[in-house]
Image: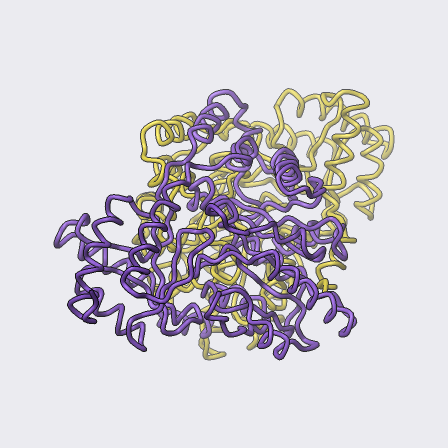
Chain colours: A purple, B yellow
């Protein structure tokens, strides 16, 4: 018989997807260059040439059966080794290949990390604003997701609310820094404080509380931002990474879980991820993609456009009197709407072909998200339109 | 806290993997050409040149952001369309692209199909001999796996035992034809009878019983075998396919679920698979692999070596007096051991560097599996060794 709970999920269409589909349809009407589509977080920069060259080299020179054969169930050894090396060099860690589990992007990484350190009926805490897909990820594992309300002043962590919500059932805490949708990176001060709370509460409850760190935007960090490596602050950290943004490879579904070598049960977690894979039918990311990424895992696409765009948008928003926290990274910014309902605000902006996403679904009602992974030329034209919109609708300057 | 049930799974090492590791180690000692390793079902034929060429063409000519960008969450349109076309032409079906859901191999396909038509606490029936990974696949979804004992005469379905085990909790039945490990293909007669039972029982219990058909060996069928397309016999069929064997791409994790357009809820099942993916962190197979396979989904590697090997092995086994059913496809054969315990038999064979897998784990105690995806020259030498082994240990001719 058909599973009713999955069937019932079909009704709820994603707001982001709906807006992005609207933008595409509208683009067909008036020309896509005239639609200022800030809805989707799709990388807008080229894949590094080295990746393409390595793919072609593999295809031209390797034995096809080795190249496309089964990888070991815990992943391609070179991929694991090179990622461990790269993380160690950059962040002063001491990962071995045995601490790296290859996954299908950050979604796959979180799905595995989560199941490794929780069981059905447990609770997991995350912090607003947060990526709405955490809902299905967490409930898909039978775990309850609790969301700490945002500290809207800084979009760091609201520690008072967090400590109040902590309880014995919480087995894991999930953070995302630099953050989608706010663009804010958690500071050293925030992470130090978070580590202290988690250490104390682990002791008090008599069980380890793991920190699952979702960090696909780790390489998109702006000048002057304090965006340290999370796992340095708390040993019981599982870092979930994706090459979607850093190498512009979102469709190739390639990432990993990196298990802090000093965490409790460090020796079990990667092999456990292998077992988790069997139940979800995942069985490792594709062989050729693991092999090619192994060679380029220390580099990134040219990500500079995101900072250029951010500065243009941030300055305009400031000038127009928006309340907004300056992003430390990502390609998102999350200003406060100019009226109470961000849904109404975004509807009105749509009439000016400005496509913004209300942040209600991210746990930040009254705010809206702009994804600025688009050409700078278009961002500049969008700012002219934004000025016009604010002036005509809200009487701004 | 670490999930104890996944941790406890770590102890049980796969027999197949253990034997294959032994074979590799032994190969280093005495030369791999002297180890007759029939343990692993890893394709031994080249990937079609057309696949490699198409991959290189995509890498050399496509815009990297389109090529490696997110695919739509229900899959690449061309991939879906071409697969539907190919199935329609070959099997007289009427699939549209909306009935095809791309997955990471057959494992991913089964994981999705299963969740779409069962819920926690339901029961699923499969038939011995069966692929042991069905255990984690099914229990991973919180569903009980019941196994109908084998009809050891033909390795078709033991219908008496099946009907006795049927009950109201059974929401799906899982078959694998051509079969791993027996190599036997279910005949038209078997599938007609199976369809009749499923139709009657669906009516009696007042709910649809879905047939999940696991068919990665569908293209490896031998002369004279009656190996029809399962979905033609029963409308409520979800076909789970992988290109691992037909295109020799096991490491690239590419396959699909094909939903029979006449099945109950046909319009919901593919979108539901999209929802299931969100919870398991799967989110579509890699973009470039979908695009390349779209172009070659109607062709196969040169699979003829498997039939040549099968005939050599079957004839030798017959000549040596083994009880064995002739395979209709795959690259497996499953003879009866020459003593009661197939574990003991395989241990003794190991002393002759013949690596066979006891079929106890496949639900066929007393039998053993040989995977003959190896060079014919080696198969021929292995038969000489097998004769020697049987003569010296069991007094055969």
Whether residue A187 is visible, yes or no, is yes
Residue A220 x, y percent position in the rendering? 47, 46
Pick whichever, B288 or B384, lies toward us.
B288
Residue A156 x, y percent position in the rendering? 53, 64
Residue B83 falls in image quadrant: top left
Residue A82 x, y percent position in the rendering? 62, 34
The residue sitting at 66% across, 66% down in the picture is: A118
Residue A55 to residue B161: above or below: above
Pick whichever, A373 or A272, lies toward us.
A373
Is A397 left or right of A81, judged from the image as shown?
left
Residue B162 to residue B56: above or below: below
Residue A123 falls in image quadrant: bottom right
Is B36 left or right of A352, judged from the image as shown?
right
The residue sitting at 36% across, 73% down in the picture is: A366
Is A361 left or right of A291, judged from the image as shown?
left
Q: Quadrant of the C terminus of chain A?
A: bottom left
Residue A80 x, y percent position in the rendering? 64, 39
Residue A327 falls in image quadrant: bottom left
């Amino acid at each position: 018989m058909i599973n009713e709970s999955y069937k019932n999920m079909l009704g709820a269409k994603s707001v982001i997807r709906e807006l992005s589909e609207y933008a595409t349809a509208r683009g067909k009407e008036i020309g896509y260059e005239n639609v200022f589509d800030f809805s989707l977080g799709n990388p807008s920069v080229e894949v590094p040439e080295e990746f393409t060259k390595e793919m072609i080299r593999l295809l031209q020179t390797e034995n096809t059966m080795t190249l496309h054969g089964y990888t070991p169930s815990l992943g391609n050894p070179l991929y694991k080794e090179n990622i461990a090396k790269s993380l160690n060099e950059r962040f002063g860690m001491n990962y071995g290949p045995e601490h790296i589990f290859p996954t299908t992007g950050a979604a796959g990484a979180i799905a595995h990390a989560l199941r490794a350190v929780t069981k059905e009926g447990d609770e997991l805490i995350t912090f607003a604003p947060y990526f709405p897909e955490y809902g299905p990820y967490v409930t898909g594992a039978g775990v309850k997701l609790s969301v700490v309300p945002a500290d809207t002043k800084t979009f760091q962590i609201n520690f008072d609310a967090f400590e109040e919500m902590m309880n014995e059932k919480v087995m894991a805490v999930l953070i995302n820094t630099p953050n989608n949708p706010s663009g804010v990176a958690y500071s050293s001060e925030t992470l130090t404080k978070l580590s202290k709370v988690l250490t104390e509460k682990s002791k008090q409850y008599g069980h380890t509380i793991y920190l699952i760190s979702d960090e696909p935007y780790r390489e998109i960090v702006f000048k002057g931002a304090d965006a340290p490596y999370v796992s340095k602050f708390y040993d019981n950290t599982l870092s979930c990474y994706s090459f979607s943004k850093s190498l512009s490879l979102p469709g190739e579904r390639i990432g990993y879980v990196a298990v802090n070598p000093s965490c409790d049960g460090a020796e079990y977690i990667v092999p456990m991820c292998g077992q988790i894979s069997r139940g979800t039918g995942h069985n490792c990311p594709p062989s050729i993609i693991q092999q090619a990424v192994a060679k380029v895992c220390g580099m990134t696409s040219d990500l500079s456009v995101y900072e250029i765009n951010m500065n243009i948008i941030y300055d305009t928003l400031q000038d127009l009197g928006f309340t907004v926290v300056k992003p430390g990274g990502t390609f998102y910014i999350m200003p406060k709407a100019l009226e109470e309902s961000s849904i109404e605000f975004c509807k009105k902006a749509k009439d000016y072909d400005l496509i913004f996403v209300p942040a209600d679904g991210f746990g930040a009602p009254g705010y809206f998200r702009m994804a600025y992974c688009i050409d700078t030329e278009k961002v500049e034209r969008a700012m002219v339109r934004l000025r016009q919109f604010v002036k005509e609708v809200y009487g701004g300057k």
